[in-house]
Image: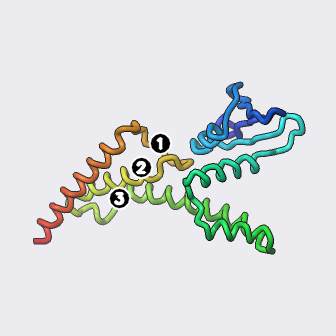
Amino acid sequence: MSDTAKPLLIKRYASRRLYNTETSDYVTLEDIAGFIRDGREVQIVDLKSGDDLTRQYLLQIIAEHESRGESVLPIEVLNDLVRSYTTQAQSVVPQFLAMSFEMLRDGQSKIVENMTRANPMSAMPGFEEMQRQQQAFMKSMMAGWPGMPNTGSEPGSESEELDEIKKQLAELQQKLSTLNK
């Protein structure tokens, strides 16, 4: 098993400081969120008791992001989650959520895969350019999702890339309008 396949072990000391056992340094919740965004699994354990604290810290990371206005979970979903803790649905909810996120990851992979396969529309003039633009759009939309390839773009180049895509889209629209006449 490779190092990145094993969960990154984070130990919580009595002082509540979090210690990365691979790099031998202290980390913050934001550091841990970064590891996860990069596709790394983490395990957080209490040094003294050995208790697994991973769930508690992951929920804390989510709560902090939500409180900063980085809302991902609609209020209806949050209400349903609260309800699931007080009903018999509790046993179904974890499996449903896990399957839903797995389907989302699979769907994203299939979209990228389908864009690169041979397509009957490939005979259409400008199809290659349109396909390249779609791929660039999907890469920018999926940046940061675990398991998705990194775009490798520099922080300042995103707006330039977007401007280029807009320009190319306008050119494509112009070509299509001349074909329709």
Q: CA distance from mark 1 to mark 3?
A: 24 Å
Q: Amino acid at mark 3?
A: Ala
- Give the SS element for disc 3: loop
- Image position of 51 (left or right of 149): right
Q: Residues within 10 Å of mark 3 (few under 14, many from 20)?
A: few
Disc sitting over residue 118 in the figure = 3
Residue that lies at the very extreme toward the left in this rendered image: 181
Q: Position of residue 66 (x, y in %)?
A: 60, 54
Q: Residues within 10 Å of mark 2 (few under 14, many from 20)?
A: some
Q: Amino acid at mark 2?
A: Ser
At a point 35% along the width and 56% down the height, the residue shown is: 134
- Badge 2 is on which residue? 140
- Give the SS element for disc 2: helix
At a point 78% along the width and 36% down the height, the residue shown is: 16
- Image position of 66 (left or right of 118): right
Q: Position of residue 118 (x, y in %)?
A: 35, 59
- Give the SS element for disc 1: loop
- In the picture, the quarter occupied by the C terminus is bottom left
- Badge 1 is on which residue? 150
